[in-house]
Image (tube, rainbow, N blue to C red):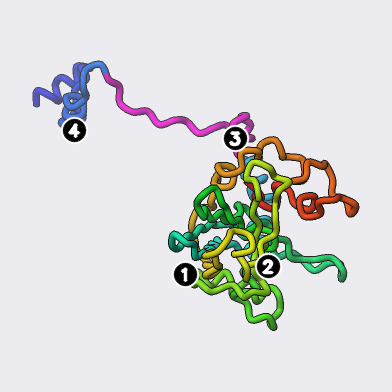
Amino acid sequence: MLVSGLQKAGIATNRPDEQTQMNSQRPGTRPPVSAPPLPPGSPRRILRAIALAVLIVIGLPIAIWNTIYPTYSWGQKTTVTVMTPEGTRSGSAVVRVSWKDSPDILPDAPHLKYEVRGEATVVDLGDGKYLFALIKGAERRGIAVFGDGRSYWLEQIKTVAASRGETREIPSAHRPLLVTFADIDDPASVTRVDPDDLTAHFGPGYALSSITLAIIDEKVTQGRVEAVLGWWEAYENRQLDGDRYTKLSAPNRLANSLNRLDFQSGL
């Protein structure tokens, strides 16, 4: 009845739940306040609407496009094993191969595009001798090794992408180009190596044991070629014979036909 009397007298009172809330509030703090909704014409609300529209207009078609025309990508690990007078030596490198499907709009235009990222395989044979398996043709090598050679090209690409974890010997017809340098400090001394006659290039006791290709998911190998070839930076825009362009009349045709892109791509 005292409460009723106070209320009649115009004196405010707190209900028990209100008193509990006030008692539980820490000194110096305010109760949380909900942010008011943004007005319809506010800049932030307009920017949000624009961002959502851009996402729908651009992002959705891209997602649909990539679903219809996907990219197939895998890691190719090339391992070269050589018998030497001191025992077996081997080197390996992983390159990333990607094939992108696209519409077949023009009859003579290729609708499959590829990209290769990685570097050549380097085998340290000892005594300053090195064997390099170049990356040229890497985009087709996996298909040649793991495809059936008969199906439609895109189907074979799908087969390679589904072959992760498999390792196979590379047939002689699809082996990478093997080269060495008579003088590792002279790029023009590059020499093609016959995989069936390493003795002719390195001496007695050297023979190719195997060249294998594995489809894996590992990081792309980097830095091994540059670590061996000290002249690497100076030949960014030159052929290995020092010329800026390839020439049929070049006296050293092999050195003139090779450049850094044969040893490294996309890095």
Is 67 contained in the magenta span?
no
Query: Percent from the top left, x then y, of residue 111?
Result: 77, 66
Q: Mark 3 and mark 4 in contact? Answer it, CB < 8 Å.
A: no
Q: Quadrant of the N terminus?
A: top left
- In terms of secondary structure, where does tag 3 sit? helix
Give the residue displayed 67% in from the left and 45% down from the top.
Answer: 54
Q: Is residue 114 above or below residue 185?
A: below
Q: Mark 4 and mark 2 in contact? Answer it, CB < 8 Å.
A: no
* Mark 3 and mark 1: Cα distance apart in space: 51 Å
Near mark 1 (Cα within 10 A), the count class, few <14, some 14-19 or many ≥20, is few
- First-in-chain label (4 vs 1): 4
Closer to the observer: label 2 or label 3?
Answer: 2
Q: Is residue 5 above or below residue 38?
A: above
| Residue assigned mark 3 | 45
Which residues fall within the magenta stretch? 29-48
- First-in-chain label (2 vs 1): 2
- First-in-chain label (3 vs 1): 3
Q: Amino acid at mark 1?
A: Gly
Query: Percent from the top left, x then y, of residue 173?
Result: 68, 74
* Mark 4 and mark 2: Cα distance apart in space: 77 Å
- Tell which of 96 and 39 is nearer to you: 96
- In terms of secondary structure, where does tag 1 sit? loop
* Mark 4 and mark 1: Cα distance apart in space: 67 Å
| Residue assigned mark 1 | 165
* Mark 2 and mark 1: Cα distance apart in space: 18 Å
Query: Percent from the top left, x then y, of residue 74?
Result: 56, 62
From the viewer's perspective, tell me whether residue 163 is left or right of residue 42. Answer: left
Q: Amino acid at mark 4?
A: Asp
From the viewer's perspective, tell me whether residue 11 is left or right of residue 55. Answer: left
- First-in-chain label (2 vs 3): 3
| Residue assigned mark 4 | 17
Query: Percent from the top left, x then y, of residue 147?
Result: 62, 77
